[in-house]
Amino acid sequence: MLNSFPKTHLLAAGALSAVVGLGLIFSPSAPVEAKRTSLSLDLDSGETSRIVPLNKELTEAVETETASVPANISPVSDAQKAAAETTASPADIADSAPPVAATPPTSSTKSAALKWQDFTINSGDNLSALFSKAGFDYGLMLSVIHGDGEAKKIERLYEGETISFATNADGELERIKLSRNRLDSLLITRTEDGFKGETVSRTPEQRTAYASGKVDGSLYLASRGAGLSDRLTMELVGIFGWDIDFVYDIRKGDHFEILYEDLYLDNEKFDTGRILAATFVNRGKPVTALLYTDKDGHSDYYTPEGSSLRKAFLRTPINARVSSAFNLQRRHPVLDVVRPHEGTDYAAPPGTPIKAAGDGRIRSAGWKGGYGRTVVIQHGDNISTLYAHMRAIAKGMKSGARIKQGQTIGYVGSSGMVTGPHLHYEFRVNGSPRNSRTVKLPDASPIPKSEMASFKAATQSLLASLNEAKGERQLALADSEEDEG
């Protein structure tokens, strides 16, 4: 029977048997079966070649062993690959291929598969009720609260916030998002070790905006006409409030220009930021304010020369009309006798907050005869301020306590010898009463000489932008007047 085969075929078969025999002697054991090299014999040519594995892992394993295959073994041809794929049945592939572990889904895949439920927090809502609405029990809520990081903060809920629950395909809780506002939220995520919370903050895009207005009736109407929000208007008053009494000093024809921040999220305006630069012209006298942040991170407003617009004292501790001016010859409204009025009275609704005029230390806080509920603050060695007839003294106001300028120290009332609710405010220098509305107030510290170069570099661009915007507006007004003419 052997004589019927060509000699070349028999020699090739013998060589192959020798190779296979040696391979069996030195081949690895079953646990590394995937790394073995399988060969096929072409009986017509007498050449051998590798059999292509039908599994990706087997293919990679064979490729790693290619270097050890004898040089006379040719690579797999495209025709052989096609033949192998054609002749192997799905069942054969399933039987021969080792199991391949499924690739775990990426975080983006998991996020896309989550199902969210949103709830707006109303007055009276609590965390337990919200978990119940979302379909989760009390035990799961405790697991979340006792999680790592900032998870415990989820207990602090406020009306108007939004809480969202995310579940996976099996209905298991994966994430909770408590949206405090459009910028800040608390995100709680399930991990292998339980739940973990973190505060996530978005940074809005800041765009510079310009507005100007002219007082005709009131500053409030002028500001609204210029498109300013109430908050920006109050900020404008706060910047220039040390030099200008916005109740009595404002005149028809006063005007202002301001450069401020518009805040955008997802290309949509949602709020306004700080005033960057502003000029207010009162009775023909211009005052310019430029925002500057010093090397310690403290921000304040200064003139272009580096002087602080902020004084050591507020001109008035409350935004209200004067009901009784400083007058050392005034007749007392209750006693009907001439008694000096050593302060200024401001009429305001009961409960209106009263601010400390400057930094200092409380000398006394409590009932003070005809003054009623009163707070007296000592500012340095020679200046003191008095605030009387309060309905209530603010929490923490006690003798010896340190106070910051603008801090609320009490609320307008009618305690003591009065005819109606108001604040009685006194300003004393070395114990002598002074008219708080006219006394020269000491300035706050200017830009130090060591930081003047940095200040100039930072504020020149603001001043240039303010002037440029002002010039463009004037040109636009001139063009408009020409068109009308």
Image (cartoon, rainbow, N blue to C red):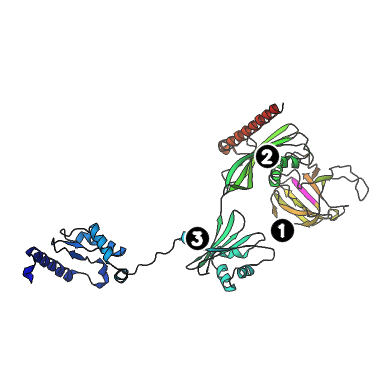
User: In the rendered structure, which segment of residues is drawn in magenta?
Assistant: 380-387
In this rendering, does residue 241 appear at all?
no
Name the residue beneath numbered marker 3: 112
Q: In front of the other: label 1 or label 3?
A: 3
| Side (left or right) of 461 relative to 419 | left
Relative to 233, residue 139 above or below? below
Residue closer to the observer: 356 or 196 = 196
Residue 212: mark in rendering: none
Q: Is residue 166 left or right of residue 210?
A: left
- Report how far apart the C-alphas of labels 1 and 3 lie in the structure: 51 Å
Residue 316 spot, x, y in % from top left: 76, 45
Residue 374: x, y in percent?
Answer: 79, 54
Specify the quadrant that holds the C terminus: top right
Residue 309: mark in rendering: 2
Name which residue type carries label 1.
Gly
User: How much space separates mark 2 and mark 3, taking CA atoms?
Assistant: 53 Å
Q: Residue furthest left?
A: 3
Residue type for callout 2: Leu
Can you say whether 91 is above or below 331 in the image?
A: below
Q: Is residue 114 magenta?
A: no
Residue neighbourhood size for the residue with mark 3, other residues' Cα within 10 Å, grouped as few (<14), some (14–19), many (≥20): few
Q: State the SS at label 1.
A: loop
- Spatial separation of the CA atoms under disc 1 and disc 2: 29 Å
Dot placed on the residue nearer the N-terminal end, 2 or 3: 3
Comparing labels 1 and 2, the label whose residue is closer to the camera: 2
- What secondary structure is found at the residue carrying circle 3? helix
Q: Is residue 225 visible?
A: yes
Residue at image coords 65%, 67%: 126
Are dots 1 and 3 in contact, CB under 8 Å?
Answer: no
The residue under label 1 is 396
